[in-house]
Each structure stands twice: as structure tokens, then as C-alpha cells.
Amino acid sequence: MVGRTARGPFSFSSDDISGKRADEPDRTCVHFIVAKRPTDLWPGITKDSTGKIDTVTIKSEVLSDPGGKMNKVSTQCKTEQRCSANVPIGFVGAGNMAFGITQGILMSGEVSAENVRVSAPSSNNLGRQSEMGVGITHSNAEVVSSSRLVFLAVKPHLVPGVLQEIASHVTREHIVVSVAAGVTVATVEALLPPDSVVLRLMPNLPCLVQEGALLFARGSKARPEHGALLRDLLAPCGLVEEGPESWIDAHTGLSGSGVYLFAEALAEGGVKMGMPSALAHRIAAQTVLGAGRLLRDSGKHPAQLRADVCTPGGTTIFGLHELERGGVRAATMGAVEAATELGRKGAGQGEVRCRERITLGTGEHGL
Ligand SMILES: NC(=O)C1=CN([C@@H]2O[C@H](COP(=O)(O)OP(=O)(O)OC[C@H]3O[C@@H](n4cnc5c(N)ncnc54)[C@H](O)[C@@H]3O)[C@@H](O)[C@H]2O)C=CC1
Ligand SMILES: O=C(O)[C@@H]1CCC=N1
């Protein structure tokens, strides 16, 4: 492939998007639009006539010219600059989740720490945010006023109070993203001004190392481009999927902390068999990591990989038999179900749910 870059930025129309530029010679090439932002989310920027693209640089690449008759031009969009790169981002709440997401998005290198602001009532957690170069404050209102995309990252039972506190600062330009487990979009929308754009996101802790599993759902006023912006922003945090809100609680149950218990049990098995603990834990971590990557990258069903490693009469099938005897499959499915049900039960009643959880003595994390 012969590459050639046309210099930009260009001002161009939808004709240019679907065809070649006026000064482009007749030959086969693809115009990559290498910088775009959804302008309807970010006013003040010149729109192209489709209303979808702005601040555009075109990079043309000659794909091939087998017959020496280069006369077709096509155009593809390719985002090199994140749509979200310049959107001011706020976090109300500065705990583990806010930290994990902040770390993930900053590690992309495309969102500047100066674009991020975080609030919490005490300074306990603000130090580590400050170390990342993020703006810190004790004022939730200040975070909302200075941001366009606001993550609501406080514990579920605090959501109603915090929403009441910030509601008068939320405008139609804001995009409010709640990460609170068990708090529905309807609850958040009901406590904000009418027409507020709300999305519900369920992240998990591996956002810290850019290997999170994140699922979001759009609220009644959130348009696909709001979802696209969130997806674009969070892409460095890991896998980002969109789905109906009814899946969020199941995702919470599935993607939480259960896997750590499995890793811990594997390591303890090694210790029981005489392996030094630190080594056993390193190997367990690497085993879980390797299995996850293999599952993800091969696209194979877990049962296929399991079958691949089971030598007839070999060690693996003996071990698997013990797992089945212990009901690990049913227990795991039951665990996801229990965590999901708790999320559903708590939906919209964060405080009630929290009290119940304290009474029941449940842990901090889902499964
Ligand atoms: N930890 C996890 O793995 C996950 C947590 N979540 C959700 O994320 C939310 C936050 O959870 P964590 O970060 O784990 O909690 P956390 O306890 O680590 O952090 C909560 C933060 O909120 C701050 N805060 C307390 N009252 C506040 C107020 N009135 N205004 C502003 N900030 C206030 C605290 O100072 C703290 O910085 C929860 O709703 C949880 O359901 C969602 C997915 C995973
Ligand atoms: O247990 C919890 O509250 C959080 C929500 C999702 C994962 N852990």
C-alpha cells in the first residue's frame, strides 16, 4: 500500500465525504477522515453538511492500482482523535470507581488530566486523584458546572441526596453517567431536571489496568451519539458494550469480584500442595489472565478450550471432576443470580438496599 497524506484541515461538504476532493487526482484511494467529533454534542465548531463531522483532516491512501486505471474514490471515517478528547469530564465521588475510570481514560493519553475534575466531601481520596493531575474540589456543584460529562460515582444510598444537591446545576448540555449499582435510570432522571441526558454505566475494577468489562444503557433522553461519546471516552478502560438497562444488574453479578475468589482458591490449592504462597498467587493471577486473554482473543467457547486441554485419563479431567462434584458450576451461576437479584431489588431504593446489606453483612463488592 502506498501512503500519501493530504494536508488539512479541510472544509468540505458531504459530496467530498462520498467522493473525491476537487484537487484529488483520479485514482483509487481511500480518504480517511482522521479527526472527528460529534458536533451536536460540542457546539461552536464548524459542521460539515452532514452534521456529523468537524475539524477534519483527510489522509488519502492509495490502496492498489493493478490495472493502472485508478479512478474510484471512496471515503472512510477513522477516528484518530477521540470524540471525547476535549469534553470536560467530572466525577462526583472520588472513590475506587472514579479512580479506576480516571486512570483508564488518562492512560489513553488522549484525554488530558486538566480536562478532568473530581469532588468528594473529604480529602481522603482526593490525594491520589490530584497526583494524576486531575482537578480536585469539595464542591459537587463546581464539578457539575465545569463539566459536560459527569460521572455520578458515590455509593448508591447517597445518590438521591447528591442528585438533589446538583440538580439545579445540571443543564441540557450535560451528560450524566451514573455508575451506582442498583440505581435505575428512572430514579436518576426523576431527580434531575426534565430532559436531562442520563446514562447508566456498570464498570468493574480492572478499568484500573485498562481491562475492564463495562456495560452501559441509555436513558430516555440519551441519544445514540451520547452513547457513542461515552463508548469513545471509555474505550481505553477495556471492553465497552451497550445494552438495555435490564442487563445491567446481570452484568454487575457477572463481572464483579467472584473471579478473585476463584483465583484465591486456585492459589490456596497450590499452597496446600506445598507451593510457596507468593509463587502460587503469581501463578494463579497469570493463569486467570492467560485464560481470559485466550478466551477473548480466540473467540472460542470456554467448553471448547476446556476440551482442548483434557487429555483422556489425564490430570485436568480428574481436577474438573472434583470441581463438578463441588458444584462449582451451579454455585457460580447461583452467585451471579444472587448478585443480580440484589441489584434488582435495590433498584431505585439505594438507601433501603444499603441498610439491608449492612443487616445481612454482605461485602462491599458484587461477584
Ligand atoms: N467498586 C466497584 O467495584 C464498583 C462500584 N460501582 C459503583 O460505584 C459507586 C462508587 O463506588 P466506589 O468507588 O467503590 O465507592 P467508594 O466508597 O470507594 O467511593 C465513594 C466516594 O464518594 C465520596 N462521597 C461520599 N459522599 C459524597 C457526597 N455527598 N458527594 C460527593 N462525594 C461523596 C466518598 O468520599 C468517596 O470518595 C457505587 O455506587 C458503586 O455501586 C460500580 C461498579 C463497580
Ligand atoms: O458491591 C458493590 O456495591 C459494587 C457494585 C458493583 C461491584 N461492586
Image (tube, helix red, strand yellow):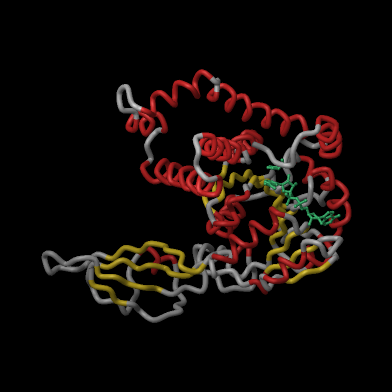
Residue shown at 63% from the left, 35% from the top:
253
In the picture, the quarter occupied by the C terminus is top right
Quarter of the image containing the N terminus? bottom left
Who is closer to the viewer here, 214 or 329? 329
Pick out the residue farthest to the left: 67
Left or right of 66: which side holds 1?
right
Residue 249 against residue 223 in the figure, above or below: above
Q: Residue at x 58, y 28 (%)?
A: 332
Q: Nearer the viewer, residue 151 or 149?
A: 151
Name the residue nearer the viewer: 99 or 85.
99
When the figure is inspected, residue 59 is found, relative to residue 244, above or below; the finding is: below
Ligand 2 shows up in the quarter that is: top right
Whole-percent x, y for residue 363 in the image: 74, 38
In depth, the one of 152 and 316 nearer the eye is: 316
Residue 143 image point, x, y percent: 78, 65
Q: Which residue is drawn at 31% across and 79% down?
A: 23
Residue at the outermost front position: 274
Q: Tell me where residue 43 sits by quadrant.
A: bottom right
**How many marks do you count on the picture?**
0
Write down the quadrant of residue 188 in the picture. Answer: top right
**What percent of the width, then of the height, locates residue 81?**
50, 69
Residue furthest top as drawn: 325
Q: Is residue 231 left or right of residue 350?
A: left
Residue 66's place in the image compared with 292, above or below, is below
Residue 115 relative to residue 195: left or right: left
Q: Position of residue 221 (x, y in %)?
A: 69, 48
